[in-house]
Structure formats: structure tokens, C-alpha cells
Amino acid sequence: MALSPIALLIVILLGVGGAGVAKAHTADISSSRIVPEGDGRYRVDVGFLGADIERMFAENKPNQADVDLTEPGMIEAMIGKFIQSRVALQNAAGETCPSEVVSVGADPANPRDSKVVLRMNCSAVSEQIFYNPYKLLEAQGKRAKHLVGVGERDAGERLTEAQLQGLEPAPGEVMIFPGDAMVDLSKPLLTPWQLAPKFFAAGVEHIMTGYDHLCFLIAVMLWATRVWPVVKLVTAFTVSHSVTLSLAALGLVDLPSRWVEVAIALSIIYVAVENFFTCKVEGRWRDTFVFGFIHGFGFASGLIEIGVPQRALVPALASFNLGVEAGQIGVVLVVLPLLLAIDRIFTHGLRDPRLVRAGSGVIACVGAYWLFERVFGIG
């Protein structure tokens, strides 16, 4: 057998693993909650992952050569100003509402997030008010997403008279991406099921950029020469990860994210090394079922990072999970036909052990890197 199919597989796997070798998930996620306080005044809570704000701040901060960053509160003050300059309430003409930074710190509602609280006064700004976070999304990058909520998290469904008249924004949520229109606070935001396609897209993106999950799936498929065993593998993985994804997203179970990521790396190494000792695929659905519980917590982190909208809890969870499944099916529909085509062209329909072992070796090495990175906190 020529070495070309082995080389091809190694290039593909290095592309998957190398693309995310520094970090298996890149969130680029932020959120805002806009709370009307009466008389044209608003409180705007801007939430973000700590890692994201560190990256954005490092890439976008001005020259601070004369600033002593060791001074207590200095970094928090700079982050507050950074966020303040990138989100705004404004009218259609671009006239912005004056704002002030109230606080910068951890988000008590979500231990994974940090939060900047702003207060904006639109009483002197005429015409309709829009919310504009696009400078923040620009700082986040091309894959940025921003979940906007109006009203307190525990706000009831009954609207006030001012909200019914369009004088104040009604409770609701919307997910926006770079290039979307500004949020018109006079109009109702999306209904729960209107939000569903956004969360479906986020689920697809999460699996397609979750390089550790992709490596796991590819590793368990490398010996597969028939469709039915792969169906069982994916079904078992889906059933188990759906359970823990739901439990974690609903806040019923919470495991330390660092050790979940360590366990995911170990699962990748396990299935890759297993390929050196057995070529049987029929019983490997048990592996994917057991490890699926662990990967489900990893999927949940993606949904939690976005922010599970309280008024759209069920459709958001269902849509995100369906997006993950759609992404998985897409991976299977690419990888399995590729493997079968290599078999047909180069080895008369048989799977060459050297191909599997070469691919498994690459995946095991990438998994080992992720394990080292996550245990020792490097990268």
C-alpha cells in the first residue's frame, strides 16, 4: 500500500488537532442584560468569560507604559473603561447616552463569568433608543456572539403599562452576531422559539470548533468499515452526553470545568490507544456511552458560556443539543466515506492497520498535549 492515504489522514488529523492545540474551545461569547430603572435610565450588565476579556484587553488596550498595573483596582478600572467604550445606548442618529461604570468583578449568577455593571442615562437623548454592542463584538473577533436580555433575570411575564405602550423595553432575549442590526428597545425581542435557530447554530459551531470532541469521534471510527456500528457509536454517545448536557445546563449538576476537560483529554487518549490493541468496533458503543457523560459536561460549558436564557430554557437547550448532533452527523458523513474510499482505492476494501495506527498515534499525542496543558494549567 502506498503511504499517500496514511499521509492524507495524518494531515487531516494534524489540522483538526493543531487548529485547537492551544485551546480546544474558543468561546468569543459575551452577554448584556438591560434593566430599565425609570426616567430614561438603564442599568446594563455586561458579562463575559474571564479568559475572553483577558484576551480582548491584551489585544486592544492602549499604551499604558505610565500606569502602575500593580496598584489595587487599576486593572479593574481599565477593564471597566474598556467595556464602557464598546457598548452604548443611542438613537438612530448616533447620539449616545452618557454612561458610568458602577462595578467590575465576578458575576455571582455565573461563577465562570465576570461582569461589568454600567449605568446609562438616556433622559436627554431624543427619539427611539437602540442598544449597540458592536465595538465589543469587533474586539471579540469574527466568531463573536452576544446574548442580550432585557429586564431582571427573574422578571415575571406580565408587562407594565409603559412596556405595553413601547415606552420601555419588554422582557425578552436575543442573540446577535457581528453585522446584525442594533437592538431596538421599543420592539419585543425574540420569542423563545425564535431564539432556537441561534442556539442551533451555536451548537453546530461548538462541536465543529470543539477539536477534542472531534478527535474522540474520529478515533472511535478509525476501525469502522460498516455503517451500523457507527450508528450505534454515535447513538450511544448522543444519549449519554444529552443527559449530562441537560443536567449541567439546568444547574442540577456542576462539576469543576478544569477536571471535566482533563477527563475529556484522558478519554481521547484511551480510545486512541485502544485502537492499537483491538480492531473490533461492535462493542465500542459502550466506550462512547460511558465517555459521553463526560463530554456532555464539556458541551454544557459551551451553552452555559452563552448564557441559558431563562424565558427560553427548553428551546435553547433542545436547539443547542440538536446543533451538536447535526455537527456530529456532519463529521460522520465526511470521515466514514473518506475511510471507505481509501479502503476501496488502496487496499481492496480492507482497512490497513498502519492507517489506523498512524491516525491513532496522532490523536493520542494531541490528547496527551491537552492532558498536560489542562493538568498543569499551561497555554
Image (tube, rainbow, N blue to C red):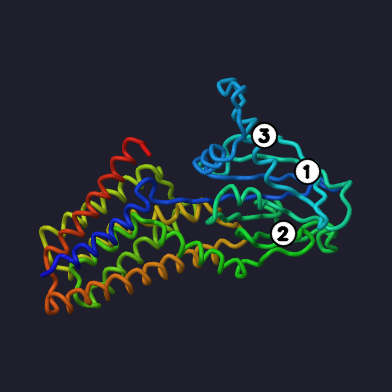
**What amino acid is at disc 2?**
Val
Mark 2 falls on what kind of element? strand
Quadrant where the N terminus sits is: bottom left
Q: Nearer the viewer, mark 2 or mark 3?
A: 2
Q: Amino acid at mark 1?
A: Met
Q: Are marks 2 and 3 in contact (CB under 8 Å)?
A: no
**Relative to 276, is 189 on the left or the right?**
right
Q: Residues within 10 Å of mark 2 (few under 14, many from 20)?
A: some
* Residue sitting at x 21%, y 77%: 226
Q: Earlier in the sequence, mark 1 or mark 3?
A: 3
Please give the residue where the numbered disc 2 appears in the rendered image.
183
Relative to 71, say whether 161 is above or below.
Answer: below
Q: Position of residue 193 (x, y in %)?
A: 60, 70
In the rendered image, residue 27, in percent from the top left (x then y), is placed at 49, 51
**What element does badge 1 sit on?**
strand
What residue is shown at x 81% (from left), y 58% (from top)? 92
Task: State the image coordinates of residue 80 (x, y, percent, origin top left).
Answer: 65, 36
C-beta proximity under 8 Å, tags 1 and 2 = no
Quarter that holds the C terminus: top left
Please state which of residues 329 and 85 is positioned toward the viewer in this rendering: 85
Q: Which residue sits at x=27%, y=68%?
A: 233
Alpha-carbon span between mark 1 and mark 3: 13 Å
Between the C-alphas of marks 1 and 2, the distance is 16 Å
- Above-or-below relation of 194 to 171: below
Marks 1 and 2, the one that precedes in the sequence: 1
Decide which of 101, 137 is in the foreground and name it: 137
Which residue shows up at 59% across the image and 47% down it? 139
Marks 2 and 3, how far apart at CA: 24 Å
Vertical placement of 62 versus 30: above or below? above
The residue identified by callout 1 is: 120
Looking at the image, which is closer to me, 353 or 105?
A: 353
Where is mark 3, residue-wise? 103
